[in-house]
Amino acid sequence: MTEARCALYARVSSEAQTRDNTIASQVTALHERIAADGFVLEPGYSYQDDGYSGSILLRPALERLRDAVASGHVERLYVHAPDRLARRYAHQALLMDEFRRSGVEIVFLNRPIGGTAEDDLLLQVQGVIAEYERAKILERSRRGRRHAARSGSVSALTGAPFGYRYVGREQGGGVARFEVVEAEAHIVRLIFA
């Protein structure tokens, strides 16, 4: 086994992915690749952001990884795909540059990235596509919520606003709805008066 200090980074963003433990499949694939490359992952070098959006950079495990990289504790980083690192191309480029300047070799499982102009172009295209994909997901979700609201459906995914309580389909005779909570509604009326 080789003595280079390896780390892995894995991320999933949705609550459903967290609940279904889909991050485990990424981690398993990363462990297998590390072993196949002849390296050993030491305890404490597995960085996992379970339930964090790739559209933001402020994620607990990513912050710890960046600190470890800056401190010279990581020489080789394994990530399933660039969009696991970040969903915005600008963020991907920033992280890749930061890691490379610290001398870290980055290994993506979905495709090897080298130092050629073509590899850099592929990484850029993948980053732009990941950003586009995220925007389309948000648009479809927004459109679906708007359609449900226009058809009179109440989404249980949103919390009841102050002055209301959510009544689920089971309690509401098959129709979800919000009901006024008079003690809170009085305060809301005072605010608007």
Image: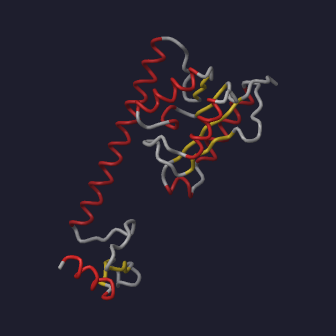
* Residue pictured at 45% horizontal, 12% vertical: 117
* Residue pictured at 60% horizontal, 22% vertical: 102
Rendered location of residue 124, percent (x, y) = 42, 24
Which corner quadrant holds the C terminus? bottom left
Q: Which of the 4 image quarters holds residue 175?
A: bottom left
Query: Considering depth in this image, is 76 or 173 the residue closer to the camera?
Result: 76
Farthest-out residue, top: 116
Q: Which of the 4 image quarters holds residue 6?
A: top right
Farthest-out residue, left: 193
Does residue 191 appear to the left or right of 123 in the view shown? left
Rendered location of residue 26, percent (x, y) = 61, 41
Does residue 23 appear to the left or right of 163 in the view shown? right
Q: Which of the 4 image quarters holds residue 131?
A: top left
Which corner quadrant holds the N terminus? top right
* Residue pictured at 50% horizontal, 56% vertical: 15
Rendered location of residue 51, percent (x, y) = 53, 52
Colour style of the rendered protein structure: secondary structure
Rendered location of residue 89, percent (x, y) = 41, 31
Q: Is residue 78 above or below residue 102?
A: below
* Residue pictured at 41% horizontal, 81% vertical: 170
